[in-house]
Amino acid sequence: MGRPVMIALVGVDGSGKTTQARALAARLRERGVRARYFENAGGRPLWNRLARALGRPDGVALFGRTVYPVLEATVRAAAMARTVAVARLTGRVAVLDRWTWCQDVIMEARGDRGRRVVRAAYAVFPRPAAALDAVVDAVARPAPRR
């Protein structure tokens, strides 16, 4: 089996990646292309809910600044491995919600250590055939009335 065809949507949280990736996969299927949507999340909402249930503000406070990035990168790597395997085995076009670059950016934004190691580990994954950047315009909003 050949290399899977993958289209990745990347961008900040709330930029519409999930909505657009699902819509693109549906549109491709409507046109007869065997396509499937894949979420490649790192589990941040799950870890944050768990942390709040245990009285901590977020996943970083629960697991620490060393363990949390490793946990998140490992969960994302498992999701990406599943994506590549399913796309390769089924021959479907994989429309991806997030890819390796998203993990790198969030680690940089948080100041996490280990980015080089994560990038090296993620190098085993094939590059998507196309990457689309979901961008949100910054819109000035009026201050709420008091």
Image: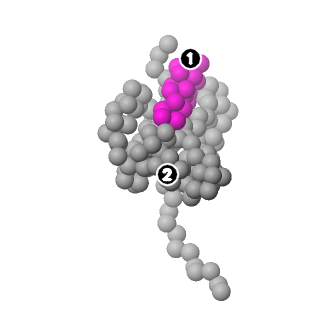
Residue highlighted by disc 1? 89
Mark 2: amino acid? Val
x, y percent for residue 95? 56, 35
x, y percent for residue 47? 58, 46
Tell me, yes or no, whether the highlighted magenta stretch contains residue 87: yes
Q: CA distance from mark 1 to mark 2?
A: 36 Å
At mark 1, the secondary structure is: helix
x, y percent for residue 58? 55, 54
Residue 11 or 47: which is nearer the viewer? Answer: 47
Residue 38 or 34: which is nearer the viewer? Answer: 38
Estimate how packed mark 2 is, as few (under 14), some (14 to 19) or many (20 or more) residues with alpha carbons within 10 Å.
some
Mark 1: amino acid? Leu
Colour mapping: one colour
Up/down of 25 relative to 134, above or below: above
Which mark is first along the chain, 2 or 1? 2
Residue highlighted by disc 2? 60
Q: Which residues are magenta?
A: 74-96
